[in-house]
Image: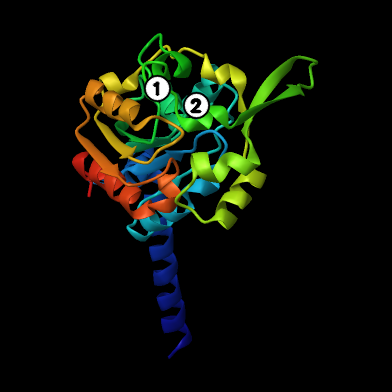
């Protein structure tokens, strides 16, 4: 190849490169945004919120199943400091998520998601797993008081704590020796012993905090009832589902920790909610 042909060929490639760069430079900002926009029909993000005496790892088996199905999953920490703080924290997280959301709460987190999801339009469904679902002006204590107390109420212990600013409060734990029988009787004793040692306490004030919003009144609701639940009366869980006009209520032979002992049943209900949003 002659020197002139080499130069001509090189200049041609260089000109093509400049043309491509120019096209990228003048591309409107909104066009670039469109490339990153949420595609129609995208699967919703599933947000899993744990309840009292637990942390995000309680969702591990459910997370694994949802991820295998191609879902984006977030299991954020629930600070367990009471409805005002916990729901505000979760609400701030929800507002950072683009696209549809299926929001799932276990136990005490049922209260938290009910308040946190209010006004968040992209939360398309609420899923309650062995959960508390108060209405506006209700608390855990006032709602659960409608039914006979669950065995767990006799297995709790209170421990005082002090904050860095000098204020004090009371944490509530499950007595380790009673956790298996009252909270997780369908797990092995070894699993229950580990849960007892790693449990996260909930502030005593959370039991009397009244919710100010009830998102379940205007969002689709899905409920799982643990028929062997000894932490929340199963009759209360059924009452809540009926009051919320749940689209689907599933009852299984489970303790309070169905997300650990029956992760497939829990996952199936979440998938029902996700599919009903119209996003496959």
Place of residue 61 in the rendered image (x, y in percent of width and height, measured from the top left): 44, 55
Quadrant of the image occupied by residue 94: top left
Up-down relation of residue 156 to residue 213 (above or below):
below
Are dots 2 and 1 in contact, CB under 8 Å? no
Q: Tell me the residue at 59%/17% (across/down).
A: 205
**The residue tagged with tag 2: helix, strand or loop?**
helix
The reply to whether residue 19 is visible in this rendering is no
The reply to whether residue 157 is visible in this rendering is yes
Q: Which sits in the foreground, 109 or 253? A: 253
**The residue tagged with tag 1: helix, strand or loop?**
loop
Q: Quadrant of the N terminus?
A: bottom left
Up-down relation of residue 43 to residue 144 (above or below):
below
Up-down relation of residue 24 to residue 117 (above or below):
below
Q: In this rendering, which labeled residue sits more in front, label 2 or label 1?
A: 1
Q: Tell me the residue at 31%/28% (across/down).
A: 235
Q: Which sits in the foreground, 219 or 181? A: 181
Quadrant of the image occupied by residue 117: top left
Q: Tell me the residue at 45%/29% (across/down).
A: 150
Q: Which mark is residue 92?
A: 2
Identify residue for label 1. 148
């Amino acid at each position: 190849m002659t020197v002139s042909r080499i130069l001509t060929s090189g200049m041609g490639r260089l000109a093509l490169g400049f043309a491509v760069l120019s096209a990228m430079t003048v591309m409107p900002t909104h066009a670039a945004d469109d490339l990153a926009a949420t595609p129609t029909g995208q699967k919703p993000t599933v947000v899993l919120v744990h309840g009292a005496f637990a942390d995000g790892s309680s969702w591990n088996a459910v997370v694994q199943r949802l991820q295998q199905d191609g879902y984006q999953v977030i299991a954020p920490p629930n600070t367990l400091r009471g409805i005002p703080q916990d729901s505000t924290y979760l609400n701030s997280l929800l507002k950072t998520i683009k696209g549809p959301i299926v929001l799932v709460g276990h136990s005490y987190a049922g209260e938290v998601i009910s308040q946190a999801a209010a006004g968040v339009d992209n939360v398309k469904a609420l899923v309650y797993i062995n959960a508390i679902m108060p209405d506006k002006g209700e608390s855990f204590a006032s709602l659960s008081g409608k039914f006979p107390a669950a065995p767990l109420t006799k297995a709790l212990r209170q421990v005082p704590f002090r904050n860095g600013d000098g204020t004090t409060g009371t944490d509530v734990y499950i007595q380790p020796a009673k956790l298996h029988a009252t909270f997780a009787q369908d797990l092995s004793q070894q699993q229950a012993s580990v849960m007892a040692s790693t449990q996260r306490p909930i502030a005593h004030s959370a039991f009397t905090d009244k919710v100010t919003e009830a998102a379940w009144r205007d969002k689709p609701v899905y409920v799982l009832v643990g028929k062997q639940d000894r932490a929340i009366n199963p009759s209360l869980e059924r009452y809540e589902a009926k009051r919320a006009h749940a689209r689907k209520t599933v009852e299984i032979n489970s303790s309070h920790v169905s997300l650990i002992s029956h992760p497939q049943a829990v996952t199936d209900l979440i998938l029902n909610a996700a599919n009903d949003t119209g996003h496959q």
